[in-house]
Amino acid sequence: MTTPPLLQVADLSVRYSTDGDDVLALDRVSLSLERGERLAVIGESGSGKSTLTHVLLGILSRNAHVTAARGELDGVDLFGGLTETQWTELRRSRVAYIPQDPNIALNPVLQIGRQLDEALRLSPRKVEKLRRRDEAIALLERVGIADAERVYASYPHQVSGGQRQRVLIAIALVGRPRLIVADEPTSGLDVTVQKTVLDALDELVAETGVSLILVTHDLAVARQRTDRVLVLERGRVVESGATAAVTDDPRHAYTRRLLDAVPSLHEGKLAPTPGLSQVDPGHREGGLVAQGLVKTYVTRDPRRGKILTPAVGGVDLAIEPGTTYGLVGESGSGKSTIARIVAGIDRADEGSVHFRGQDVARARGADLRTLRTRIQYVFQNPYTSLNPRFRIFDVVAEPLRGFKVASGAELDRRVRDALDVVGLEPSIATRTPTELSGGQRQRVAIARSIVLRPELIVLDEPVSALDVSVQAQIMQLLIDLQHEFGAAYLFISHDLAVIRELSDRVGVLRRGELLEEGPVGEVFAQPKHEYTRRLIDSIPQFA
Amino acid sequence: MTLQFEDRAVAEHDEHAETALAEVPGGIAVVGTTPARARPRRSARVVQLTQPSFILSALLVVAVVTAAFLPTLFTSLDPYATDLANKLAAPTWQHPLGTDNLGRDQYARVVYGTGNTLIASLLAVVLGLSVSAVLGILAGYLGGWVDEVVGRFVDIFLAVPGLLVSLMIVTTLGYGTINIAIAVGIGSVAAFTRILRAEVLRVRESDFVTAARLSGLRWWSILPRHVFPHSIGPLIALLALQFGEALLAISALSFLGFGVQPPEPEWGLLVSEGRTYLSSAWWLAILPGIVIVLVVLAANRVSKFIEKVT
């Protein structure tokens, strides 16, 4: 006897209507999932992958209209007008959810034990009150939390991000679900943690035979850890099949584009687009030299007095003109602090930053202003770094006006040139940032940073807020710009794969200390420090 | 416990989806005309606009403002014409609010009094706003000792009831419409300043303000270009609310006799004059009082509306 698939969905469409404006989020999506199978749902933002997870969990917003030819989960008809109570029952026993961001998905004012206890109390397994604690600790141990007792008694802020995500997985396991829906479960986590969380999920599937739907934008993760894949583009399934087959031989152009965008596929620094002219950068000698940077943040707490948080402890680095220095580290490693010191936004407590002989850290007044025209900064989040009320023209023109280097027709020409080299149409100049997509916004931010023709651009995670394919475009753009104008980059990232594609030299930062530093090829081939090795191992490998 | 978070996640995803749909390979993209964010707001605005309490309040405010500038639209009677034979008359069709001790039509006096009361209130609000705009923005953006000084000043003003502050000021300035407007305006500076300072503290940390600093802009050009437009949002709702409060304070000061002097009509003054005849002709004090209450309530309701739609 063959068992029927756990989940079968045919011709599922979801339409959101707002004010008579309809958006088709899912368009005739069909899928089926066997027991114990792992399905990857791939797509960029706006592809409808989150909508798909919400349909399966019955948590769509009120303005969503669902139509489907069939939808069956473990013998339950999903679209046969289930009441909210029935959905609740389904969620308590058959389908579980692992949310995206572990930092906001746990209640910050309740101990983790209480939150697990709540799930256990509501589960249909009827765990006795006195057994619940043991059960909860067993669950925590099962998802790979070593000090389960401590975590049980802790508040969410007292445990690490990876542990928080594991706690969420443990909560998902409470009802012994048949299907786990994980919505980008690791995108908020550091790379090394990412790996362990995904390992924990893999083990669970192997041990318990639960089915997994893993929503991700990362093709490498999908390839490594799933059996089948579903590629969504604007609500339509453009390709599906066995993961290995699809990633080896993508049929659809969109899948191919996503694959090309995976950074870990490439070796070494990207090549500039052929046929670009080079502008002579003029003087090429003397780059940036930072020595012994120390920065400590001081916060005052009425109860505990002064709290000192060391962010950077004695970092040296040097950037040659026209090259890229990649600074890699996990959250809290102090990489943004260094970026801000180098750009002259914040001041170091100790140490010096010399840019072509001038001290950035001590510069004041007119000297500082001249330095700022030579060192520019691109922020991580293009949604906050552009004034939403400004027209794009004014955004890009601001440095020219601020430093009074151009006005009138000259200003006009330089702004249009800058927009042109970052690949934006002139017509965009009259729009406002709110009308643009994330990739376009980041292009505008880059245009603003190059309009002064700086000699050094500090890029603080400029691609991490963007979709993979957009990320690839922006990275190519940065390479091309460097080739054209010969500016040096200080490139900050948590992603070693991205660093490898862009940098000449790389520095590995942990807890404010530079563990290792050297040419990209060397560091990747022969990492000296054990931590660097771990970072490199955590990059999802494709082969 | 998780459901609430999930709901929020849905909303966030939708918004994200809308903006990102426009991204097209090659980077040059055709972008949808309306950003997704504007949509739910528009429908919320329609819901708020059609609420009867809001419609009534808005009509009342419009009527009162019109009466302040064109009193002849509302009454054909002269507020100064005495008719001693018909003094202290009860409300009739001819005199909807009755007549006062000199036989003057009370309704006409309320209508003509609107000008004095309203202009003083508006003046007070504008004055309070402009002083606190300067103080709040400087304190929030510059920080340091400027913040300390402004902060202490605000603390002192908040510790003392606003009306008391206004009384102190008006006794030094002397009587008159302009003087009580100044007094009430200064009394409201503290509330505005505190809110504006908090907003500026939030906005000054945003990336685009840092970007402006790196773009070589000086603080005096960053403030009006980047900080001020993003900080005044909550202030606009407060403005309507404060207008109601100012109106009450102006009326109170006039009631105590600090405002315009008889025989000129003014709402607070009318209540004060009517008070003498409370036992024989209660409508003289009570009805103008009700008018004040209604206008203040209407201003609050309009403020609520602004708060909800922005």
Image: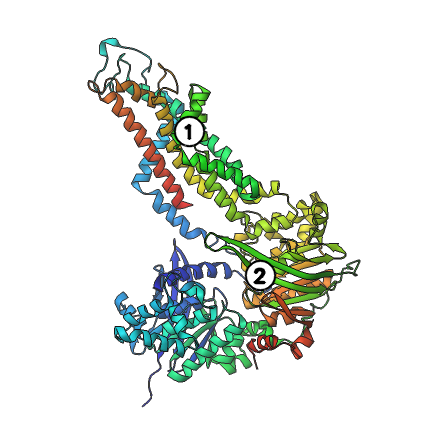
The amino acid type, in three-letter code, at marker 1 is Val
For mark 1, name the chain.
B
**Which residue is located at x 60 percent, y 77 percent?**
A530
Q: In this figure, what is the number of numbered marks?
A: 2
Q: Residues within 10 Å of mark 2 (few under 14, many from 20)?
A: some
The amino acid type, in three-letter code, at marker 2 is Pro
Q: Are marks 2 and 1 in contact (CB under 8 Å)?
A: no
Using the image, determine if residue A461 lies above or below residue B149: below
In the image, residue A467 lies at what x, y percent?
54, 66
Q: Secondary structure at mark 2?
A: strand
Taking the view exactly as shown, the residue that stands out farthest to the top is B85
**Which residue is located at x 25 percent, y 75 percent?**
A128
Q: Quadrant of residue A472?
A: bottom right
Q: Residues within 10 Å of mark 1 (few under 14, many from 20)?
A: some
**Which residue is located at x 39 percent, y 20 percent?**
B259
In the image, residue A280 lies at what x, y percent?
78, 60
Q: Which mark is residue A310?
A: 2
Using the image, determine if residue A284 lies above or below residue B163: below
Q: Nearer the viewer, residue A365 or B120?
A: A365
Instruction: Tell whether B108 sits left or right of B34.
Output: left
Q: Secondary structure at mark 1?
A: helix
Q: Which residue is mark 1?
A: B165
Q: Do pointers 2 and 1 mark residues of a single chain?
A: no
Q: Quadrant of residue A183?
A: bottom left
Tell me the CA gap for discs 2 and 1.
47 Å
